[in-house]
Every structure is written in structure tokens, then in C-alpha cells.
Image (tube, rainbow, N blue to C red):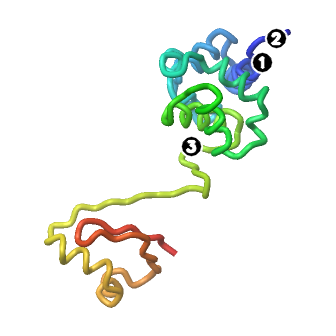
Amino acid sequence: MTRQKSFKRLVRSRMDKTGESYTAARAALLAAEEPKATEGPALGMSDEAIRRRTGRGWEEWFELLDEWGAHERPHSEVARWVAEAHGIEGWSAQAVTVTYERARGLRAVGEGPDGFTITASKTVAVPVERLFEAFLDESLRRRWLPEGELRERTALRPKSARFDWV
């Protein structure tokens, strides 16, 4: 019986796209090399690093998750299974789950459960109270940000505010 067939599929996919030998493609994936635009997904960390954290390398994780049917289950269920059934702590369980999802084409880099998000920050040379009011007071905000609607999610006066841009 073929061992680690899911990882071998990932290696062969890389070979097809890059023209590398099997050995070179496997080594690049195990080293978590950054992908080029034409290559498949990179692993979240090296094989050695995930093995230190979890006791298993990527080949073993991909085979185990494929056999369990992780590709048909939601992210939270997979992460919970990795944590509970295999005794893997939170961050490492998430790393295994997200890397598996990316390798199987179930999730892109930067994609979360609700799609893609962006974050922006800017340092402004004004007192924090004045800046806070410029964002939270809609009439003030319309003077300098006339288009677009911001919906406030959270605000901790006067330190931070989070909005959804509509």
C-alpha cells in the first residue's frame, strides 16, 4: 500500500508545474519554501518544525486528515479533531488545519471563514481624543471621508475603534 499518498500528490503537482525532479519538489515542500506564482501552496512551516510541535511531519498529517475525511468537514470541526483526538494544542492545531486546507485548495492565503479581510493602520500627529472623535462622530467624519459607510464594531474610548467598511 502506498504510504503518504496525499503528500505525494502535492509533490507531483509541484513537479508538473515547475519541472523539478521528485526529490527537488519534495525537498522544497518540506522546507516550506515560498511559492512562486505558478507553484502550489507552501507549507505553513518546515517539516522539522511541525514535527517538533506535533510529533508528526506534513506527510503524516496530510495522510491522516485525508483518511478522516477532513476535506469534507468545516474548519472548526477539523481543528477541534486535531486538538482533541491527537492532543495538539490550539495554535499548532490551527497551523495543521490551515496548512491542510491550503494544500487541498480549500482555502487561499489570507482567507478566513468569512472570506478575505484587510486591515489598515495609520499614525496621525494629533491628540488621540481628537482623532477618536473624527472617526466616531459621523458629521466630522463626512468632512474628510465623504464616500463610503463605516459601521462601528467596537470602540474603546479613546484608544481604538474597529469598523466594517460598507
Question: Which residue is located at x 52 percent, y 18 percent?
Answer: 31
Q: Secondary structure at mark 1?
A: helix
Q: Does the residue at mark 2 contact the one at mark 3 (Cβ under 8 Å)?
A: no
Q: Which mark is residue 5?
A: 1
Q: Is residue 13 left or right of residue 153?
A: right
- Distance, label 2 to label 1, CA atoms, is 6 Å
- Residue 94 falls in image quadrant: top right
* Circle nearer the N terminus (3, 1): 1
Q: Residues within 10 Å of mark 3 (few under 14, many from 20)?
A: few
Q: Which mark is residue 109?
A: 3
Pointer 2 residue: 2
Q: Does the residue at mark 3 contact the one at mark 1 (Cβ under 8 Å)?
A: no
Q: Nearer the viewer, residue 96 or 44?
A: 96
Q: Is residue 56 left or right of residue 119?
A: right
Q: How many marks?
A: 3
The amino acid at mark 1 is Lys
Q: Does the residue at mark 2 contact the one at mark 1 (Cβ under 8 Å)?
A: yes
The amino acid at mark 2 is Thr
- Residue 128 falls in image quadrant: bottom left
